[in-house]
């Protein structure tokens, strides 16, 4: 998949700009606070349907303006024509999304058409950080690949929020009501857990291959999805069938404790990925460098999984991550990503003069404007 161009109008610090990208490595470089990450955020919006910086849509509108407009053109390998996705983000009212000029019903209809893997410094804590980061890694990857996963997850989160509100209000004592919630959450939860479990099995194989290529010793990584739905479960189908009953029992059997605690204590919103190196918990035993290498391998593996499922590589978006890595890992990542499109932001253009990556397109970002590469400027 190739992101050919993005146009941004009244988006963050960009008043009006169109940026075209080449099929290989594209570097958005420049000083701090010029708009590099803003451009990447704009591209990723079309993959995820929202900002990767957790910003609300209103925050993405240029200060003092009424609406931001984004338009992204991408080309799929097997398609004859490029596709254009558009988004209007108004200050008040709902956003409008379009594909090929036709209005979409919402984010659900858009997600999955343009696929991207984002890698930013936060992801370097994938191994050492908290479980929410790892769940979100799974949710974002799976949502882009399987619309049914996104459906289950949205419904699960909605019902969970309702159940939590009821628990807090303390107004329901009828067991039948709790049973209805338990039934819904356990069905959806078992589906989510089974899909995450299957994904992790595929991902683990890629992580092991990539990690082995990083020359960081002979440790073997082992990544297993850990679900309260079915601890120690290896088989996704088993998770689906046995997990539902287990979750149902846990949810119906613990309501008094949950009322005391004030929230739902059991379910896939508590799950995690166990990451081990040579059979030891990586979070506690692996070195900082090994943890980062594992995180890097997980992100690269996410791209491999997208290719396995979707038939082609997604676009790789790297926000500021290269400056966080040492020279060896930087080389590794650029070497590993040849033959794929990468759009990377960096304050340090010198990283790309090493010859590691072929045909690098250097785009200088300055005060919300993008200056064309020198060779293209002279042609005009
Ligand atoms: N809604 C907005 N309207 C106008 N400007 C904004 C808006 N939101 C953010 N900005 C500004 O955009 C500028 C550029 O932000 P961005 O995160 O893209 O910088 P960057 O080039 O990635 O810098 P760094 O190298 O520090 O990561 C910031 O100065 C920020 O204040
Ligand atoms: Mg930035």
Image: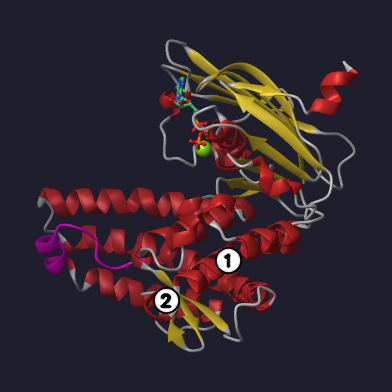
| Quarter of the figure with residue 294 | bottom right
Frontmost residue, 293 versus 245? 293
Q: Does residue 46 lie above or below 93 as drawn?
A: below
Q: Position of residue 303 (x, y in %)?
A: 67, 59
Kindly identify the residue that appears in the image at 52 percent across and 54 percent down.
324
Kindly identify the residue that appears in the image at 75 percent across and 54 percent down.
313
Q: Mark 2 points at which residue?
A: 243
Q: Where is residue 158 in the image (x, y as percent from the top left)?
A: 36, 48
What range of the chain is rendered magenta?
A: 256-267
Q: Does residue 43 lie above or below 241 as drawn?
A: above
**Left-right relation of 268 to 373:** left
Q: Mark 1 points at which residue?
A: 298
Q: Do the residues labelled 2 and 1 touch (CB within 8 Å)?
A: no
Sooner in the amino-acid sequence: mark 2 or mark 1: 2
**Left-right relation of 239 to 146:** left
Frontmost residue, 265 versus 67? 67
The reply to whether the magenta stretch includes residue 197 is: no
Kindly identify the residue that appears in the image at 41 percent across and 70 percent down.
272
Applied colour scheme: secondary structure
Helix, strand or loop for disc 1: helix
Q: Residue 335 carries which label?
A: none
**Left-right relation of 183 to 164:** right
Q: Position of residue 236 (x, y in %)?
A: 54, 76
Which quadrant holds the C terminus? top right
Kindly identify the residue that appears in the image at 46 percent across and 63 percent down.
126
Measure the alpha-carbon separation of dots 2 and 1.
Answer: 26 Å
Helix, strand or loop for disc 2: helix
């Amino acid at each position: 998949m190739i992101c050919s161009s993005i146009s941004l109008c009244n988006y963050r610090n960009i008043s009006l700009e169109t940026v075209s990208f080449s099929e290989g490595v594209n570097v958005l470089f420049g000083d701090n606070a010029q708009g590099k990450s803003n451009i990447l955020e704009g591209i990723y919006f079309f993959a995820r349907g929202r900002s990767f910086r957790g910003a609300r849509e209103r925050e993405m509108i240029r200060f003092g303006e009424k609406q931001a407009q984004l338009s992204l053109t991408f080309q799929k390998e097997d398609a004859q024509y490029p596709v254009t996705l558009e988004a209007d983000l108004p200050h008040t009212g709902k956003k409008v999304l379009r594909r090929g000029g036709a209005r979409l019903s919402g984010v659900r209809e858009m997600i999955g058409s343009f696929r991207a893997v984002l890698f930013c410094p936060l992801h370097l804590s994938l191994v050492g950080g908290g479980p929410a980061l790892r769940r979100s890694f799974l949710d974002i990857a799976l949502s882009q690949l399987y619309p049914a996963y996104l459906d289950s997850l949205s419904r699960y989160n909605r019902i969970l929020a309702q159940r939590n509100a009821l628990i807090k209000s303390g107004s329901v004592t009828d067991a039948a009501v709790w049973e209805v919630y338990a039934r819904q959450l356990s069905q959806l939860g078992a589906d989510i857990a089974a899909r995450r479990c299957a994904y992790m099995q595929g991902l683990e194989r890629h992580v092991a291959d990539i990690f082995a290529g990083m020359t960081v010793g002979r440790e073997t990584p082992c990544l297993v999805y850990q679900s309260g739905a079915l601890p120690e479960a290896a088989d996704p189908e088993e998770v689906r069938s046995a997990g539902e009953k287990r979750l149902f029992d846990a949810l119906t059997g613990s309501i008094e404790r949950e009322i005391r605690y004030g929230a739902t204590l059991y379910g896939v919103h508590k799950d995690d990925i166990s990451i081990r190196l040579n059979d030891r918990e990586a979070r506690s035993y692996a070195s900082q460098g090994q943890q980062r290498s594992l995180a890097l391998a997980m992100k690269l593996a996410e791209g491999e999984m997208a290719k396995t499922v979707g038939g082609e590589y997604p676009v790789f978006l790297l926000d500021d991550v290269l400056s966080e890595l040492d020279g060896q890992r930087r080389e590794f990542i650029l070497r590993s990503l040849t033959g794929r499109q990468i759009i990377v932001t960096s304050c340090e253009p010198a990283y790309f003069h090493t010859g590691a990556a072929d045909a690098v397109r250097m785009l200088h970002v300055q005060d919300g404007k993008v200056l064309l590469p020198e060779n293209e400027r002279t042609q005009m």
